[in-house]
Image: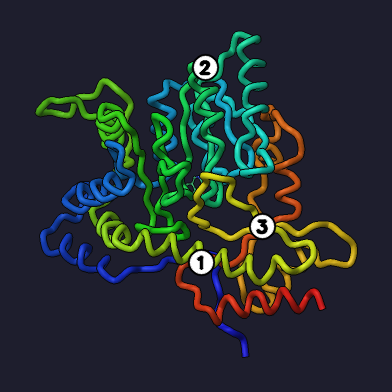
Amino acid sequence: MMQPKMWLSSPHMGGTEQDFVNEAFETNWVAPLGPNVDGFEKDIASFLGNNVHVAALTSGTAAIHLALVQAGVTQGDVVLCQSFTFSASANPIVYQGAMPVFIDSEATTWNMDPNYLEDAIQHYIAKGQKPKAVIVVHLYGMPANMQAITALAAKYEITLIEDAAEALGSSLHGQPMGTFSQYGVLSFNGNKIITTSGGGALVSASAETIATTKFLATQARDAAPHYQHSHIGFNYRMSNISAGIGRGQMQVLPQRVQQRRANHAFYQRHLSTLPCISFLEEPTGYYSNRWLTTILCSQAANTPDRESIRLQLDAQNIESRPLWKPMHLQPVFQNAPYFGGNVAEQLFANGLCLPSGSNLTTADLDRVIGIIKNLYQ
Ligand SMILES: *Cc1c(COP(=O)(O)O)cnc(C)c1O
């Protein structure tokens, strides 16, 4: 008999979400504003600390878009973006008519390599096309090398945007991810560490940035009794229903981080003894929420490769997935310039994300490692 589907990362409710949603119905706050939106923003701000301000939005993609708009990115501008990521990190660059330029990853964090970043910055400055913004990503929850990257952004005076969509609950030397730059991006899509069914947020230390974000996200209405507009606006504000789910989810976020980290520890304990499977370690001071557990399979002869593991799990109704295909290899970005070597490319060739939901049972995890171990017999 076929076992039920085991997902890579599925929603995991804490229990109080529906109370907040019911309250929204009872008070008729069924709109893209209301007490749940305000409450959810407060919950995120107090979780991130450090005087953080938050605008709850319809998606993480919308948050990146509004960060680029506020950074003044327009037609023809150069924006430097990590290549090893989900396409949503880069698509808003194109919404603005700007030119994405992709940067390879470093082997130690799998995130943006500061050396290639500086090469690219210098290249475009020399051409008289100083980059308008840099988008760095904390992929799978692992913080990027923010010490080096924030220093480069400061040195060359370029706006930094931090895509922390996968890294809520991660930190670097104790500082939460999303708070290292003027614009931090969060996502609450259904597969993320917590979800609002779909949603995102822009976070910033600047109250003014967040006030402008909320203005732009609600059709950019000027202060007037009639509808008056002196800017192009967007309809990007989070609904009060979604935010109610988010308020419930924030109550269990610390547990969700612990559960994801426990999944990672379990896989590492049982699989790192196999020849040719390796895990991404946290460098000193790095704390990952381990949103997804990822393994690398070496290409040694006589050991199963990434694809044979994925297919074997799939045959048992278990979802696993290759690591993100780098943006510079995507057909849609085939003409975009790229600075780097083959780090991201090799990660894509050999890496696999294992089922990582916080709602997986020990029996589920045992099944996964059993199937993988069997392939090695
Ligand atoms: C999920 C994700 C996004 C986009 O967030 P949405 O809320 O789905 O729009 C952006 N970047 C990365 C790295 C993501 O994983």
Any mark on residue 279, and which?
3
- Side of 32 where 67 appears, left or right: right
Q: Is residue 217 above or below residue 252?
A: above
User: Going 31% across and 39% down the picture, which residue do you hit?
Assistant: 235
| Foreground of the two, 122 or 70 | 122
User: Going 13% across and 28% down the picture, which residue do you hit?
Assistant: 226
Instruction: Categorize mark 2 by other alpha carbons within 10 Å: few (<14), some (14-19), many (20+).
Output: few
Distance between the Cα atoms at labels 3 and 2? 34 Å
Per the image, the residue denoted by label 2 is 155
User: Going 25% across and 58% down the picture, which residue do you hit?
Assistant: 244
Any mark on residue 262, and which?
1
- Side of 310 where 237 appears, left or right: left
The location of residue 44, given as percent across then percent down, is 30, 48
Quarter-wise, where is residue 203 in the image?
Answer: top left
Distance between the Cα atoms at labels 2 and 1? 39 Å
| Foreground of the two, 199 or 54 | 54
User: Going 61% across and 79% down the picture, which residue do you hit?
Assistant: 366
Instruction: Categorize mark 3 by other alpha carbons within 10 Å: few (<14), some (14-19), many (20+).
Output: some
Figure colour scheme: rainbow
> Could you tell me the amino acid type at mark 3?
Phe
- Side of 187 where 40 appears, left or right: left
> Could you tell me the amino acid type at mark 1?
Ala
The answer as to whether callout 3 falls within 8 Å of ligand 1 is no
Cβ atoms at labels 1 and 3 below 8 Å apart: no
Quarter-wise, where is residue 175 in the image?
Answer: top left
> Could you tell me the amino acid type at mark 2?
Lys
The location of residue 78, given as percent across then percent down, is 57, 21
- Quadrant (top left, top right, bottom left, bottom right) of the C terminus: bottom right
Mark nearer the N terminus (1 vs 3): 1
The location of residue 98, given as percent across then percent down, is 54, 24
Q: Is residue 230 above or below residue 237?
A: above
Which residue ends up furthest to the right in the rendered image?
Answer: 301
